[in-house]
């Protein structure tokens, strides 16, 4: 969807870019002016301003994942974070509507955690290769093959899958969740690499489902080694990367974990083995750090744009629905994650 595709009524709401508007949003733009030319920003600015004005009218908050583009992340989001933080924050939202700028499983999780709220996704087709890599029938078959073994599902799954498992986890707490279960064997779905990452750090035997993140599986240890020779390059990887990449990295953690570590360590040079927008979003917090490539784009995250967000907020749709009979069991798995890791969700 391009700006010209917005309905005429909505186009009329877009403010003209004048000096006052530019001045009002200058502190926002300064956070990512290194990665977006001013000419491009000036085409984004009316959308950003219109969304922020409309949020108040619609009693809505915008929650954005760390992989959203900086115009969304810094320009319109009321709350940002990794999957764990977004799920937690959804449970605490006061506004009547949540606009979730992230992929579909994140919007669905927000729906589970805030069942009395309206949850809107700017593009419900924003999928995830992990979430589409396993079905509820697959989980039932696994349970039949391994009776009595608890099943841990990465939050990157559909509500149908969440409803079948014992507990969810995110990249930020997978190891804690597995250890807290106190079971000798655990089934982990759907990310085979996250499961291996956990298996190497626990005495619990892990039964692995071989799903993959199509973005993180593309990183290689060779790419790391190419940059290793250059002095002071600190390498941070997401646990969805392959074991060889994880072994070659200095830090492994969720997107929020990476941000925390970066702010504390403030390395002179860093390589983030994760989605490209992470570096664009966090660089303002660590101005003395240089970010070196490589990075990979998530095509699903990139389906979310300012145009679609404005359209969705204005129309109050598409709403994210979860079948009535799935809400309680799927929510229970997310809630069990919070309880097991002693974090209050709601
Ligand atoms: P985080 O929970 O670490 O933000 O990861 C979500 C995700 O989809 C990573 O690819
Ligand atoms: Fe899914 Fe990978 Fe995209 Fe994250 S980066 S949303 S795991 S496809």
Image (cartoon, rainbow, N blue to C red):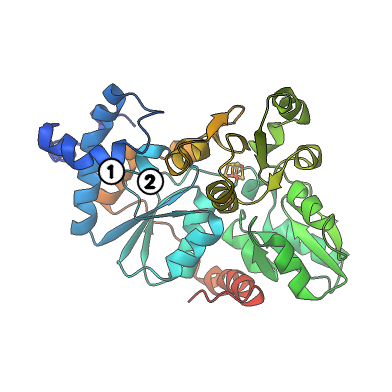
How would you rate the neighbour count of disc 2 (Cα within 10 Å): few for under 14, some for 14-19, many for 20 or more?
A: many
Tell me which corner region of the image, top left, top right, bottom left or bottom right, holds residue 24: top left
4 sits left or right of 261 in the view: left
Q: CA distance from mark 1 to mark 2?
A: 8 Å
SS assignment at label 2: loop
- Taking the spot 39% from the left edge, 44% from the top edge, the residue there is 73
Tell me which corner region of the image, top left, top right, bottom left or bottom right, holds residue 149: bottom right
Which x, y percent locates residue 269?
59, 32
Q: Can residue 307 be seen in this snapshot?
A: no
- Residue 311 shows which numbered tag? 1
Taking depth in this image into account, of 246 and 156 the one nearest to the observer is 246
Q: Which residue is mark 2?
A: 122
Tell me which corner region of the image, top left, top right, bottom left or bottom right, holds residue 158: bottom right
CB of mark 1 within 8 Å of CB of mark 2? yes
Taking depth in this image into account, of 301 and 255 the one nearest to the observer is 255
How would you rate the neighbour count of disc 1 (Cα within 10 Å): few for under 14, some for 14-19, many for 20 or more?
A: many
Q: Is residue 266 above or below residue 184?
A: above
18 sits left or right of 44 in the view: left
């Amino acid at each position: 969807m391009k700006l010209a595709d917005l309905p005429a009524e909505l186009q009329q709401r877009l403010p003209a870019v004048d000096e006052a508007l530019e001045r009002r949003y200058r502190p926002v733009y300064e956070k990512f002016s290194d990665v977006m030319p001013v000419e491009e920003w000036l085409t984004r600015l009316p959308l950003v301003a219109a969304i922020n004005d409309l949020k108040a009218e619609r009693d809505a908050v915008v929650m954005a994942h760390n992989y959203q583009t900086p115009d969304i992340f810094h320009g319109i989001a009321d709350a940002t974070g990794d999957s764990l933080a977004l799920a937690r924050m959804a449970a605490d939202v006061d506004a009547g509507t949540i606009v979730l700028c992230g992929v579909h499983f994140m919007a669905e999780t927000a729906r589970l955690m805030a069942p009395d709220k309206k949850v809107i996704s700017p593009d419900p087709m924003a999928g995830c290769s992990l979430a589409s890599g396993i079905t509820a029938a697959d989980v039932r078959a696994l349970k039949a093959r391994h009776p009595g073994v608890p099943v841990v599902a990465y939050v990157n799954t559909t509500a149908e899958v969440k409803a079948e498992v014992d507990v969810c986890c995110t990249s930020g707490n997978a190891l804690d969740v597995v250890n807290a279960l106190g079971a000798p064997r655990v089934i982990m779905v759907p990310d085979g690499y996250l499961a291996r990452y956990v298996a190497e750090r626990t005495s619990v035997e892990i039964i692995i489902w071989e799903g993959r993140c199509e973005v993180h599986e593309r990183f290689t240890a060779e790419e790391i080694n190419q940059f290793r020779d250059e002095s002071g390059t600190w390498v941070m990887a997401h646990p969805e990367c392959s074991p060889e990449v994880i072994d070659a990295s200095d830090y492994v953690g969720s997107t929020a974990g990476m941000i925390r570590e970066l702010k504390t360590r403030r390395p002179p040079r860093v390589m983030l083995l994760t989605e490209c927008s992470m570096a664009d979003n966090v660089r303002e917090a660590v101005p003395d750090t240089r970010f070196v490539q490589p990075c990979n784009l998530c095509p699903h995250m990139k389906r979310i744009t300012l145009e679609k967000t404005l359209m969705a907020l204005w129309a109050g749709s598409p709403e994210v629905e979860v079948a009535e009979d799935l809400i309680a069991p799927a929510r229970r798995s997310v809630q069990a994650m919070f309880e097991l890791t002693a974090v209050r969700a709601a």
